[in-house]
Image: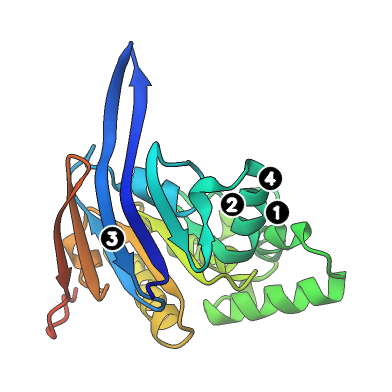
Amino acid sequence: MAYIELKGVTKAYRKKNLDVMALAGLDIAINRGEFVALMGPSGSGKSTLLNLLGGLDSPTTGTIAVGDTDIGRMAETELTSWRSQHVGFIFQMYHLLPVLTASQNVELPLLLFRMNGKERQERVRLALDIVGLAERMEHKPSQLSGGQEQRVAIARALVTDPDLLLADEPTGDLDADSAHEVLLLLERLNQEFGKTIIMVTHDHKAAGHARRLLHLEKGKLFSDTQKAETMVTY
């Protein structure tokens, strides 16, 4: 059985008395441990799909199962709890709090869990070590490069040990070298730690680091391609 399964998923938004169809009947299955890139032109439904997979929005029709859970039928309080345990979010703009250190930013998701300060600090140190920033724990975002900020954001997404990482244009605000480092880190999280990763991107080079490419057009699945053996590199 697939880890993620969408059946007949649609998503419509009401705009100026009109129903705008963002997703139109998606049927997609994703196995545990896959690294999937979502591509397509603006307005194709990529970010809408990512929001649905993360439980940030609900489908208009159809079902979305992640693991054994039908997240499309959960109440908001249930979704909040489910997200905190199973999903890590990585955004283009990092969303780090400027007044907090790297370690304090990474610690924030753990405040929702019942654990003492020592346990939280152990989790934070491990997450920052995985992304190669253990020596920058006490630095604030203004003291870090863009690539380092994004790696702190990835550590924050990792600190709860989620099954699923959802990345929305994670390299969109980075220079080529920093983007490459972040993409190699995502590959490592997928291959060594077994994280299921779904990444929205407009960048074909970034998509080349994934093992599977889903291309959306006008809310529909246009193509579903397994990556060839040849890597796309910088």
Quadrant the N terminus occupies: bottom left
Mark 2: which amino acid?
A: Leu
Numbered disc 2: secondary structure: loop
On screen, residue 194 versus residue 202, left or right, reads right
Tag 3 residue: 28
Mark 4 or 1: the one toward you: 4
Q: CA distance from mark 1 to mark 2?
A: 8 Å
Mark 4: which amino acid?
A: Thr
On screen, residue 112 versus residue 35, left or right, reads right
Mark 3 or 1: the one toward you: 3
Tag 1 residue: 100
Which image quadrant for residue 196? bottom left
Q: Residue at x 60, y 81 (%)?
A: 129
Residue 76 vs residue 43, the one in the foreground:
76
Tag 2 residue: 96
Mark 3: which amino acid?
A: Ile
On screen, residue 133 versus residue 106, left or right, reads left
* Viewer can see residue 12: yes
Which image quadrant for residue 200? bottom left
Q: CA distance from mark 2 to mark 3?
A: 32 Å
Q: What mark, if any, has residue 70 been given in the picture?
A: none
- Where residue 157 appears, as percent x and y from the top left, is 56, 64
Q: Residue at x 35, y 56 (%)?
A: 6
Please report whichever mark, 4 or 1, sits nearer to the chain's N-terminal start.
4
Tag 4 residue: 77
Numbered disc 4: secondary structure: helix
